Amino acid sequence: MLNINRPFEAFLDKIDEVTILIPKDRDGEKKNFSLMLNKGTEPLFIIDRMDIGTHSKYICKLPCEFQFGKTYMITDEQGTETDLQIGSVIRTFEFDEKFAYPASDLGANYSKERTDWKVWAPTATHMKLRLYLQNEQVFETYQMTREEKGTWSISLEGDYDGYYYTYLACINLLWNEAVDPYTKAVSINGKYGVIIDEQKTNVPKNNLPHLKSKTDAIIYEAHIRDFSIHENSGLVHKGKYEAWLETLTNNSQGDPTGISYLKELGVTHIELLPVNDFEEVDEKKPQDSYNWGYNPLHFFAPEGSYSKYPEDPYKRIIELKSVVQSLHKQGLRVILDVVFNHVYSKENSSFEKLLPGYYFRYDENGMPSNGTGVGNDLASERYMVRKFIVDCVTYWMKEFDIDGFRFDLMGIHDIETMNQVEAAVLTLKPDAFLLGEGWDLNTPLPLEQKTIIKNAHKVPNISFFNDQFRDVIKGSTFSLNDTGFVYENMGKFDQTKLLISGSTTIFANPEQSINYVESHDNHTMWDRFFLFSETEEKEIKQARHRLATGIVILSQGVPFLHAGQEFFRTKKGVENSYNSPDHINCLNWSDRSSYKDNIEYIKGLIKLRKQHGGFRLTTKKHIEKHLSFSTNQQLLSYHLRDIGVFGPWEQIYVVHHVQLNLSHDLRLPGGGEWMQIVSPTHIFLDSPTAVKNEIKVNEIGTYVFCKN
């Protein structure tokens, strides 16, 4: 039944309150309503009436306790009947309290002898399990049994390994077929959930040493497909998970590519754009379309377009687990980009089919809120949404051995949910990394409950993308004419000093600051510089680009690099390439050779950061004690002093010079000989150059000096 013609409509909007909408031509002064029960009828007490245009709206008190899971009828004084639909009651505290289900048995729980299914759908009046054969023919449909807290369950004897399945839910007299939100495996293009034996997906683990501090991390963001799809990647399995298993690969120039290149570069964490099942790429023909993956469909199951065998639900799981362990074997940790702030299509989501209106936020007018910009915001503050998020991240950690999560549009989520995520994740891996976008978005959640940068002190173990760092150093993401510090904007001088110091005026500790100037979003830094100053010499642009990346790597906090940033990645001027073709999004492995000198420079800065903990201080107190800036307001320089306990040198002096046509005479502090280890174009870590106390700074870029 797709449509129901109702003479008037009645909704349970509060646990004891009914809203009735009746057309004006059916209304009258003596209008009254009753609730039909087995024993007869009970009158509804009208507590309010209002005119809403073509209809009259009545608010009525319910005469008895409402029993969810059954259908009630409302009748008026003329004997006209309508069904009482489940309305906005599902978004009340009382509903959440009544149906909060804490157990961990949702989904399909398989054994060779029996499979148990359980799904949470408290407003359904009927629920069925439908099994399909792998040719998508219906095998059988079974009635499920309603149990505690609005759950429905069924157990079937026998071996159902490999069967497809869905749920059929009857809510407000309408039947909908939904894929299990907790399914761990899906058929091609996510049409069905798939029952699997998780023991068959085991992949041996490679353990990593404990990460002592988050400031020891250097995060490198990459997309599964972009990483290998380029014709000169030297990788066999282009665009696939298995490209991440290939080692000792080279491009046609003979330079290392793939994960061997990542290890050589020296980064510590690989942040992967979404790898859970998403929409807008046909898994049967993945080459025909492209997407970053921010259109979540199934949250527990891996995406199939990256698999060599997308039709095999086991293969894609094993492949992705193997990616994680392949990176672990290289000493690289894995952070997953997760998208719990919205779904691809609210109306077609399993959430909406199994409990309409519950999983999403609504504004004061009853319209879906749109802080995400895609027409729906997930309501993380509701008990079962929060539970879903926590269950999902812990599943990825337990099953896939993930080392952390990057939360897309984290500002949509409430602080209590993120605190529960943190507790669950750190219980499993005390050195796991949690980070996210703390933007303040227009969603009905009260400001003080949002996980935004302004509230960073309320979640001190969660890190935030520092957009001030990005825009002050590089230039505003949203205005090409608003130049950054590296383009000689001396109005950003004092802000830059605060950012280099770990942004401790913004965050509770430097570990919370994710320092970056480029990510998958918006223009690459190279494209932005080209658009802003097309006529500037390429070498000067490269110097500014190198300087911006150097500031990221050497500042207090956590450095974050976009894949290919170290060889001037371009997307040919495309600002938002989420669905652009491969030739726009691919990591150009030929450029890896063309700009080898720049890669060696960035590699050297990474090595320097790792070599001395003076660049990785963990507390605001340590930064205040050891870091001080020069009073010269034309040349940004700072002194790291008394830092022998953190690394091989007692003192380090850093200069970031941005002015093309100005040179400065710099006097290094104190007596004794300094050694230069970084110039704007070279790293001398293995062969430091002795310098006098007075030196001339005349090139755009970074200078680093050290002494004991």
Image: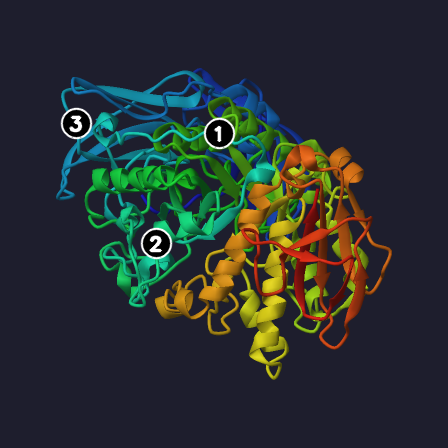
Name the element at disc 3. loop
- 327 vs 236: above or below: above
On the picture, is 405 further left or further right than 460?
Answer: left
Name the front one of labels 2 and 1: 2
Q: Which of marks 2 and 3 precedes in the sequence?
A: 3
Out of 163 and 314, give the one closest to the viewer: 314
Query: Which residue lies under the disc numbered 1?
Result: 390
Residue 708 x, y percent position in the rendering: 70, 42
Identify residue type, mark 2. Answer: Gly
Q: What residue sits 35% from the left and 30% below the top?
A: 399
Q: CA distance from mark 3 to mark 2?
A: 39 Å
Name the element at disc 1. helix
Name the element at disc 2. helix
Q: What residue sits 48% from the left and 45% below the top?
A: 339
On the picture, is 411 further left or further right than 348?
Answer: right
Pick the quarter of the image with the N terminus. top left
Query: Which residue lies under the disc numbered 2?
Result: 258
Instruction: Determine which quarter of the picture holds residue 22.
Output: top right
Whether residue 509 is visible to the viewer of this picture, yes or no, is yes
Name the front one of labels 1 and 3: 1
User: How busy is the neighbourhood of tag 3: few (under 14 within 10 Å), some, or many (20 plus)?
Assistant: many
Identify residue type, mark 3. Answer: Tyr
In the drawing, what numbered circle is on residue 160? 3
Residue at far right of view: 631
Q: CA distance from mark 1 to mark 3?
A: 28 Å
- 123 vs 612: above or below: above
